[in-house]
Image (cartoon, rainbow, N blue to C red):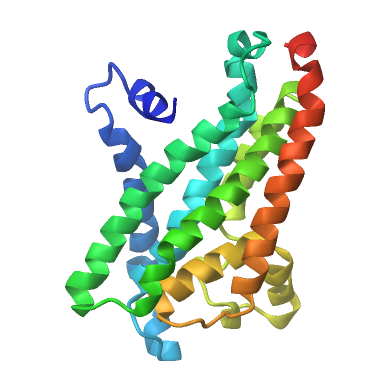
Amino acid sequence: MAKREIGERYSGQLLGVFWAIGHPLVVMAVYVFIFGFVFKVKIAQQTNVPLDYATYLLSGLIPWMAFQESMSKASTVIVANSNLVKQFVFPTEVLPVKGVMATVATQSIFLSLLVLYVLLTQHSLPWTYSLLPVLLVLQALGMIGVSYVLSAIGVYVRDTKDLVQVFAVTGVYLVPAFYLPEFVPSVFSRLLYLNPFSYLIWCYQDALYFGRLQHWWAWIVLPVLSLGIFVIGYRFFRKLKLMFANVL
């Protein structure tokens, strides 16, 4: 179902599946241009960290864009597949999961491109790159849990998709993807530690950018968050799914 979703989403279009990669690639290129060349953010020069700003930006932006895409899909997935939901023999728990799987597949392509970029520019890869499969699994669990919650709420509150879109636009500035926490005033930097998405970004930055466990505490918090959200989301979905057919 995930494979079919990727194919059907762009079927009949001139460039087809290219848009699955082309659209987020353009968005990321715009971010790199604006913050790296227009605003001339120079993290590497100011903090003596290993790689260039583009790598820092993309190491946080890629997982964030994947997460926001999965949330957008989840908010409408049950309503969009109401014909399947009304069939009692169909396991509705599959619907949020297949959207996450399709998103992870696209994210894996972008991570591969980033790995290739670092390999070409640095001629070697830190050992932390071996942790990427673990991060993908933990991220997928978290995305499935959040997708279960949003998909269930989206059946009863149709405004959920609009709220998710607003959060997707503003939320990227609430995670340390464009800046280091040291650049934020101490009054507001504490909010980064209250944001559960920050721990996901920090782990990816450790693996892809710093090449060491710079934020070691994030590697403890992230597995707990991912597993906890997955369990809570699944149970939440199971309780609300009983009335899906009546509402749809």
Note whether 174 is above or below 18 in the view shown.
below
Q: Point out the residue furthest to the front here.
A: 89
Front residue of this view, candidates 133 and 79: 133
Note whether 59 is above or below 226 in the view shown.
below
Q: At 68% across and 47% down in the image, what residue appears? A: 230
Note whether 50 is above or below 222 in the view shown.
below
- Specify whether residue 56 is in view: no
Q: Quadrant of residue 225?
A: bottom right
Note whether 86 is above or below 174 in the view shown.
above
Q: Quadrant of residue 75?
A: top right
Estimate the x, y position of residue 109 in percent, counting from the top left. Answer: 31, 49
Left or right, 161 with respect to 38, comes to right
Q: At 59% across and 78% down in the image, what residue appears? A: 181
Q: At 70% across and 71% down in the image, what residue appears? A: 193
Front residue of this view, candidates 189 and 128: 128
Quadrant of the drawing holding the C terminus = top right
Estimate the x, y position of residue 54 in percent, counting from the top left. Answer: 34, 68
Quadrant of the drawing holding the N terminus = top left
Estimate the x, y position of residue 237 in percent, counting from the top left. Answer: 74, 32
Q: Point out the residue furthest to the bottom here.
A: 48
- Specify whether residue 210 is in view: yes
* Count of numbered badges drawn on the protein: 0
Estimate the x, y position of residue 130 in percent, counting from the top left. Answer: 37, 69
Q: At 23% across and 66% down in the image, what residue appears? A: 117
